[in-house]
Image (spheres, grey):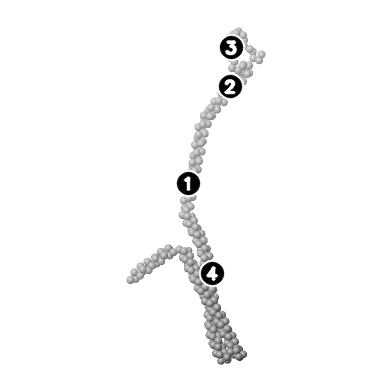
Amino acid sequence: MSIFKRLFSIGKAEAHSAVDKLEDPIKMTEQGIRDLKGNLNESLQGLAELKALAIRAKRDHQQFLSQSKSYEQKAVLLLQKAQTGELDPSEADRLASEMLRKKEEAQQQADRTGKEMTSHEQHVSKMNQNIQMLKSKVGTYENELRTLKARSKVSSATKKINKQMSQIDSSGTVAMLERMKEKVTQEEALAESYGEIAAMSTSVDDDVEKALGSSSTSSSASLLELKAKLGLAQNASPSTDADPSTPPPTPGV
């Protein structure tokens, strides 16, 4: 039997845990505030009914007091009429006694309604205090609920961000960046090496052409200078029609 009890206790605990997970504290608080507002509306309706009873009791009390005073005044008038001879004394006494009896009944009713009025007014005052307290609590709970909603949103967003940040592998990211940096550096060095090789292959031919061109130009300039010293025209050559016996001109003549 103890085993079955333990199994039952475990199942009950798991059921309570599942219910706790399904329950939303904010929704439960909102439902609680709605219930309080429902109670507040019922209390306001009860207060209105109680005030109506107090108002009616007050009116009845004033009416019975007025009747009691009126009956007393009528009894006095009857006795005065009997004294002046306007009314038979015995008849005046009978009618005056009847008025006094009614006055007494009206006074009793006035006392009763006066007590009811006082009782209703006391209940109205107490109930009004409770309603004001309930209104204050509802307002306080609504303000706290708004604050809790805002805090819940902030905490949820913060938790989401922190969770994302915690899942980031900083060491792996740094290592990957270092590998990328090393690869880029290697590619840049390789590109520079190919550039130097290309420059070397073109500069050899250019150097040869430059050397040959400068040598030919230098030789031509030297030849022209020598011819100018000998007084020979540029590109001039000995004529085949000249007389062989004529001697060549003497330099400097």
Q: Residue at x 49, y 71 (%)?
A: 42
Other residues around mark 3 within 10 Å, as few (<14) / some (14–19) / many (≥20): few
Other residues around mark 1 within 10 Å, as few (<14) / some (14–19) / many (≥20): few
Q: Position of residue 52 (x, y in %)?
A: 52, 75
Q: Earlier in the sequence, mark 1 or mark 4?
A: 4
Quadrant for the N terminus in the image? bottom left
Q: Position of residue 166 (x, y in %)?
A: 47, 55
Q: Which residue is mark 2?
A: 220
User: Do labels 3 and 2 touch, CB within 8 Å?
Assistant: no
Q: Could you tell me how far apart the alpha carbons at marks 1 and 4 are, in whole angstroms?
A: 65 Å
Q: Could you tell me how far apart the alpha carbons at marks 2 and 4 are, in whole angstroms?
A: 117 Å
Q: Could you tell me how far apart the alpha carbons at marks 1 and 2 are, in whole angstroms?
A: 62 Å
Q: Which residue is mark 4?
A: 136
Q: Could you tell me how far apart the alpha carbons at marks 3 and 1 are, in whole angstroms?
A: 83 Å
**Up-down relation of residue 215 to residue 62 (above or below):** above
Instruction: Tell which of 174 and 244 is nearer to you.
Output: 174
Q: Which residue is mark 1?
A: 179
Instruction: Tell which of 185 and 221 is nearer to you.
Output: 185
Query: In the image, which is nearer the foreground, mark 1 or mark 4?
Result: 4
Query: In the image, which is nearer the foreground, mark 2 or mark 4?
Result: 4
Q: Residue at x 49, y 56 (%)?
A: 161
Q: Amino acid at mark 4?
A: Ser
Q: Amino acid at mark 2?
A: Ser
Which quadrant of the figure has residue 97?
bottom right
Q: Residue furthest front?
A: 86
Q: Which residue is mark 3?
A: 239
Q: Residue at x 51, y 36 (%)?
A: 195
Q: Amino acid at mark 1?
A: Arg
